[in-house]
Image (cartoon, coloured by chain):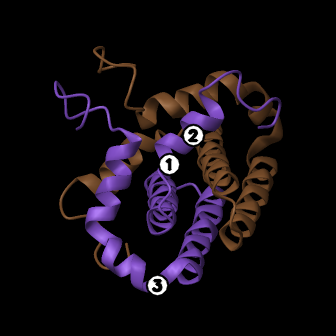
Chain colours: A purple, B brown
């Protein structure tokens, strides 16, 4: 991974967003933002279902899907998630209280 | 950051999730999962609004908030996001087609 040549881990946010881009961008681009948002919300609903359940594998998978779809939405809108979170959360004190 | 001592960047997913834990866990834990999910959905709605708009700073900020709240939900449910995405997306071919 870029910037950390000594190790394949830990996973950087940039690398994961790029992985999702490499793997799915063409399909995601074709959906466009509204269509992709619909998929994202479907995953958010599945995350809610998993949060109600007792299956840890399912829960972890739904969190993974939620993040993957957030990366997809960012990719097709030319947003660098790592830069975005660095700007808002890692410079200065970050948002107060409940973010 | 753990595992990448040569550089403070790039940002690892683990480090960002931990940052959110360090900064907000006590408040997040008090909200519980349903209350936190409600905050998360509020941010998802704000992301939708920003996707309709033309303000890039606002859009980047809403993506950052969405990821921060996903980290919060993961934190209070003892889910390691980096491990979850590695398991589902980085081992083998990953989900086909639309994830």
- Can you identify the residue that label 3 sits on? A31
SS of the residue under disc 1: helix
Return the x and y of residue A52 as percentages of the image width and height: 66, 59
Which mark identifies residue A85? 2
Q: Estimate how packed mark 3 is, as few (under 14), some (14 to 19) or many (20 or more) residues with alpha carbons within 10 Å.
A: some
For disc 3, the chain is A
Left or right relative to A69: residue B82: left
Query: Residue at image x 63%, y 21%?
Result: B22
Q: Estimate how packed mark 1 is, as few (under 14), some (14 to 19) or many (20 or more) residues with alpha carbons within 10 Å.
A: many
Judging depth in this view, the residue of B10 and B70 nearest the camera is B10
Query: Residue at image x 30%, y 20%?
Result: B3
Which mark identifies residue A25? none
C-beta proximity under 8 Å, tags 1 and 2:
yes
Return the x and y of residue B41 as percentages of the image width and height: 74, 60
For disc 2, the chain is A
Does label 2 lie on the same chain as label 1? yes
- Can you identify the residue that label 1 sits on? A81
């Amino acid at each position: 991974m870029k910037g950390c040549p000594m190790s394949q881990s830990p996973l950087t946010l940039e690398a994961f967003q790029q992985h999702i881009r490499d793997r799915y961008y063409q399909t995601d681009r074709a959906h466009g933002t509204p269509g992709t948002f619909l998929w994202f919300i479907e995953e958010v609903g599945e995350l809610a279902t998993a949060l109600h359940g007792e299956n840890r594998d399912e829960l972890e998978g739904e969190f993974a899907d939620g993040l993957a779809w957030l990366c997809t939405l960012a990719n097709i809108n030319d947003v660098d998630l790592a830069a975005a979170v660095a700007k808002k959360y890692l410079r200065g004190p970050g948002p107060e209280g409940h973010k």
